[in-house]
């Protein structure tokens, strides 16, 4: 893509009233636009990153048998009353998430989705009746709306955000556990591929409906809202809420061996037992002709939360540093005065071989400003073509993560990125 045609502009200054590093950098670089507190638009560059994150999650969910679908935002209150989660609008309530609600013209209330356990359980009442129909795993990428009290962590805590939510439906506790562990492994692969592997921990957390624990996937970061305790040599992490003497003695570990860290919850997996299948009447008939409630689990990853976490974890003082797996482009080709003609040729050759290139072909921008923009945007490789490099039939390559400049011949450049 030609940067001269990109409608978003970078900014030198931090946006006012934005506390979080992720939102400050993403706004300055033109990846997102802030509509209001906790509500962000994805601009073209931001959407490219977002879609790559979705692509990685989708591959890993398909690999463990997930079937993708898309549920609705408008929700029927009657379903949520059955599980006792139709709580007052905006209320922080142990029985339910903070709703946004709306009304039909006739005055009837509707919910604006904040999660989908009830919705999917109800749908499956029409598709599941026998043990032969189980297990099944369904997931979606869908907009969730939550009337969050605080929205100070940029795109990591939004009031409108896209979540990957997968739900598992199993016959037995063993069948459920087997998938739960498969999904935990898939999550670790996702965070690895997102460049967060070396700082993301599967973490014991509270809140499993039918077992003692749920699991959170926590990425170490000073920007995190959570606190976890880590025992490095055992690769063991425990959320602050469950870091009690009782749990520690159950696990046969000592409090003083743990390190305390701030962290970001990038995902979680949750045993649900038969809470929703019982409330909504999702039963299956066993081989022995007995009717039993289906055993469920839910598995979430916030796509924006993951994107914000990558920015928080990997940026430097000059800007964003995208891992190549989610970078909006693989190469930032920068033409300086005298290099335009060769840069133009190189752009065409790189595109022809399928390399994703952002081509800074702007003619009225000083070299220093082009370099500053390049660092801010965080594309993994920068290629500069100038009078000086062209004289040697070369271009200058610099990785975003390194200070080293490398000269590569114009002729060999496409191979370099192939
Ligand atoms: P938190 O404790 O951070 O509020 P949660 O326990 O409410 O998260 P879930 O409802 O299980 O989380 O959502 C699953 C995933 O969705 C989370 O692990 C997180 O990645 C993401 N998520 C949750 N709330 C938000 C939000 N307000 N903005 C962006 N992503 C979110
Ligand atoms: Mg929450």
Image (cartoon, rainbow, N blue to C red):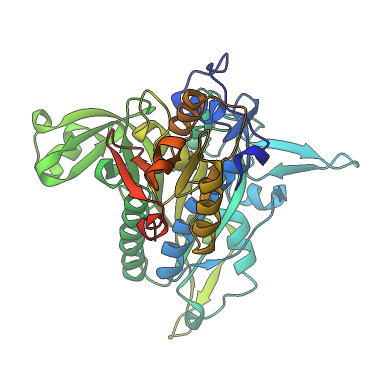
Taking depth in this image into account, of 345 and 44 the one nearest to the observer is: 345
Locate residue 220, reporting x and y percent: 29, 34
Left or right of residue 252, residue 176 in this image: right
Which quadrant of the structure image shows residue 322? top left
In-front residue for pair 36/282: 36
Residue at the limit of the structure toward the right, as seen here: 106
**Camera-nearest residue between 118 and 67:** 67
Numbered-mark total = 0
Name the residue: 31% across, 53% down.
188
1 versus 169 height, above or below: above
**Vertical placement of residue 29 versus 209, above or below:** above
- Residue 280: x %, y % from top left: 60, 60
The answer to whether 55 appears left or right of 233 in the picture is: right
**Looking at the image, which residue is at 9% across and 28% down?**
256
Q: Is residue 215 visible?
A: no
Question: Is there any visible trace of residue 81 in the rendered image?
Answer: yes
Residue 212 image offset from top left, x and y in percent: 30, 48
Specify whether 70 is left or right of 56: right
Q: Residue furthest top?
A: 16
Residue 57 position by quadrant: bottom left
- Location of residue 289 with respect to 24 vertically, above or below: below
| Horizontal relation, residue 327 to residue 72: left or right | left
Of the 4 image quadrants, the one containing the C terminus is: bottom left
- Along the line of sight, which residue is nearer the eye, 306 or 410? 410
From what the image shows, is residue 335 above or below residue 55?
Answer: above
In which quadrant of the rendered view does residue 124 lie? bottom right
């Amino acid at each position: 893509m030609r940067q001269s045609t990109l409608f978003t502009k970078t900014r030198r200054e931090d946006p006012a009233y934005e506390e979080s590093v992720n939102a400050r950098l993403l706004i300055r670089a033109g990846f997102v636009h802030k509509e209001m507190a906790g509500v962000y638009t994805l601009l073209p560059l931001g959407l490219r990153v977002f879609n790559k994150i979705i692509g990685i999650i989708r591959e890993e969910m398909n690999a463990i048998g997930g079937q993708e679908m898309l549920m609705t935002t408008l929700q029927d209150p009657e379903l949520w009353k059955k599980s006792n989660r139709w709580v007052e609008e905006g209320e922080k309530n142990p029985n339910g998430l903070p709703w946004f609600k709306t009304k039909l013209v006739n005055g009837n209330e509707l919910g604006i989705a904040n999660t989908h356990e009830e919705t999917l359980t109800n749908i499956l009442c029409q598709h599941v009746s026998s043990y032969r129909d189980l297990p099944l795993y369904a997931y979606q990428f869908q907009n969730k709306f939550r009337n969050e009290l605080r929205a100070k962590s940029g795109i990591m805590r939004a009031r409108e955000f896209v979540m990957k939510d997968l739900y598992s439906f199993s016959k037995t506790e063993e069948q459920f556990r087997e998938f739960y562990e498969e999904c935990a492994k898939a999550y670790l692969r996702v965070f690895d591929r997102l460049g967060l592997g070396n700082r993301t921990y599967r973490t014991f957390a509270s809140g499993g409906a039918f077992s003692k624990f749920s699991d959170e996937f926590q990425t170490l970061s000073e920007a995190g809202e959570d606190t976890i305790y880590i025992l490095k040599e055992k690769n063991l992490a425990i959320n602050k809420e469950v870091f009690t003497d009782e749990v520690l003695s159950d696990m046969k570990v000592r409090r003083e061996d743990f390190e305390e860290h701030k962290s970001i919850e990038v995902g979680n997996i949750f045993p649900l037992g038969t809470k929703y299948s019982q409330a909504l009447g999702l039963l299956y008939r066993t081989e022995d002709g007995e009717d039993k409630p289906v055993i469920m689990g839910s598995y979430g990853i916030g796509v924006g939360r993951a994107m914000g976490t990558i920015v928080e974890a990997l940026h430097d003082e000059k800007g964003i540093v995208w891992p190549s797996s989610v970078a909006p482009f693989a190469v930032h080709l920068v033409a300086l005065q005298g290099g335009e003609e060769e840069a133009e040729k190189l752009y065409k050759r790189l595109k022809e071989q399928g390399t994703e290139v952002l081509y800074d072909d702007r003619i009225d921008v000083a070299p220093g400003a082009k370099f500053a923009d390049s660092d801010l945007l965080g594309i993994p490789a920068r290629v500069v073509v100038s009078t000086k490099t062209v004289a040697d039939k070369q271009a200058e390559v610099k990785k975003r993560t390194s200070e080293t400049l490398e000269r590569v011949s114009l002729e060999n450049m496409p191979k370099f990125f192939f």
